[in-house]
Image (spheres, grey):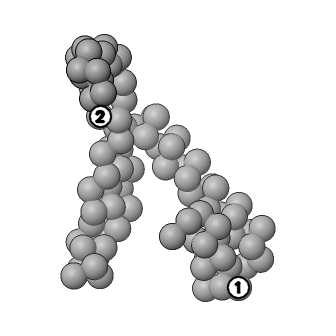
Amino acid sequence: MSKTDLVAYIAEETGFTKADAARALEAMISGVTKGLKKEGKVTLTGFCIFEAKKKAASTGRNPRTGEPVKIPARVAVKVKAGSKLKDALN
């Protein structure tokens, strides 16, 4: 499902216009981003947990040439599915 499909689904389910649904989705994404930056973790009970994890610098390999490549330190996002989401998929 693409973002456009999700906006259309939200609009259909809520009765919002597509523009309102797009703004609501953008607000949700912005809220998760700000929460991760500020607190490092966002929990949507039953759905998922977003967690910012610091990754140390490392050395990888270019798969074509085999040459070593330096991978800089960064912050990655870990997403863990909640119980309701897991149950809905199984």
Q: Which mark is residue 62?
A: none
Q: Residue at x 35, y 50 (%)?
A: 50
* Left or right: 13 in relation to 70: right
Q: Position of residue 35 (x, y in %)?
A: 47, 43
Q: Residue at x 63, y 55 (%)?
A: 27
- Amino acid type assigned to the residue bearing label 1 in the image: Gly
* Left or right: 15 in relation to 30: right
How far separated are the C-alphas under marks 2 and 1?
A: 37 Å
Decide which of 64, 7 is in the foreground and name it: 64
> Does residue 58 show up?
no
> Does residue 76 show up?
yes
Q: Residues within 10 Å of mark 2 (few under 14, many from 20)?
A: some
- Amino acid type assigned to the residue bearing label 2 in the image: Lys
Q: Residue at x 30, y 16 (%)?
A: 69
Counting labels gives 2
Task: Assess whether mark 1 and mark 2 are in contact (beta carbons under 8 angstroms).
Answer: no
Residue lying at the far front of the rendered structure: 65
Check the image and report above or below for 43 versus 87.
above
Q: Position of residue 18 (x, y in %)?
A: 74, 73
- Mark nearer the N terminus (2 vs 1): 1
Q: Where is residue 16, by image quadrant? A: bottom right
Q: Position of residue 15 (x, y in %)?
A: 70, 85
Q: Position of residue 83 (x, y in %)?
A: 23, 72
Q: Which residue is mark 2?
A: 53
Q: Where is residue 17, by image quadrant? A: bottom right
* Left or right: 71 in relation to 87: right
Q: Which residue is mark 1?
A: 15
Check the image and report above or below for 82 versus 78.
below
SS of the residue at dot 2? strand
Decide which of 30, 62 is in the foreground and name it: 62
Q: Residue at x 26, y 56 (%)?
A: 80
Q: Where is residue 36, by image quadrant? A: top left
